[in-house]
Image (cartoon, rainbow, N blue to C red):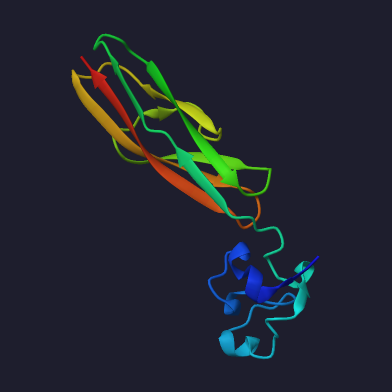
Amino acid sequence: MTVSLLERQGVFGATGLAQLTRGNKVPNGPSQNAGVPTNLPVNLSQLAGAVNYVPMSASANNVSDSVNNGVTGYTFGPSTCSVTGGNPSKTYSWTYISGTSFTIQSPTAASTNFIHPGHAPAGNYSGTYKCTVSDGTASVDSNTITVSLTRT
């Protein structure tokens, strides 16, 4: 398959033609691409690192629940990281960012529940978590969510 670099620069995640290269060399600057025609067909296999790039977008839902204060080891959720685009094989990673630290039940799955262990005083507990998705090539995206639990 052949394409024009000028027509396809956005498809490969480039903001300009200087970010696209031929062969296995990455130029030090745009001036090294001066001799590369941008309006002639280029075989996709000539683009270093861009052949398998497919734009991808990840989104995940916030989680909110409430529980009686006497309950221990309360599991709630789930939050599901939905992905559009990218290549078919995806890996997921859920990580704690800040606030209340709940246990992430399935840290490498697309969907996970959260666990609030032990007894805690009545009140509102809230933490920030991130789901990162990779498709094994150049596509990586993440989404930050809020996980909230009210103990009454």
40 and 91: which is toward the camera: 40
Residue 39, quarter of the rendered image: bottom right
Residue 96, quarter of the rendered image: top left
**In this picture, is 98 found above or below 77?**
below
20 and 150: which is toward the camera: 20
- Residue sitting at 57 percent across and 85 percent down? 30
Q: Quick check: 9 left or right of 112?
A: right
- Residue sitting at 58 percent across and 84 percent down? 28
Residue 84 in picture, x, y percent from top left: 57, 44
- Residue sitting at 55 percent across and 52 percent down? 140
Q: Quick check: 19 left or right of 79?
A: right
Q: Quick check: 148 left or right of 55?
A: left
- Residue sitting at 67 percent across and 48 percent down? 87
Residue 23 in picture, x, y percent from top left: 75, 76
121 and 35: which is toward the camera: 35
144 and 95: which is toward the camera: 144
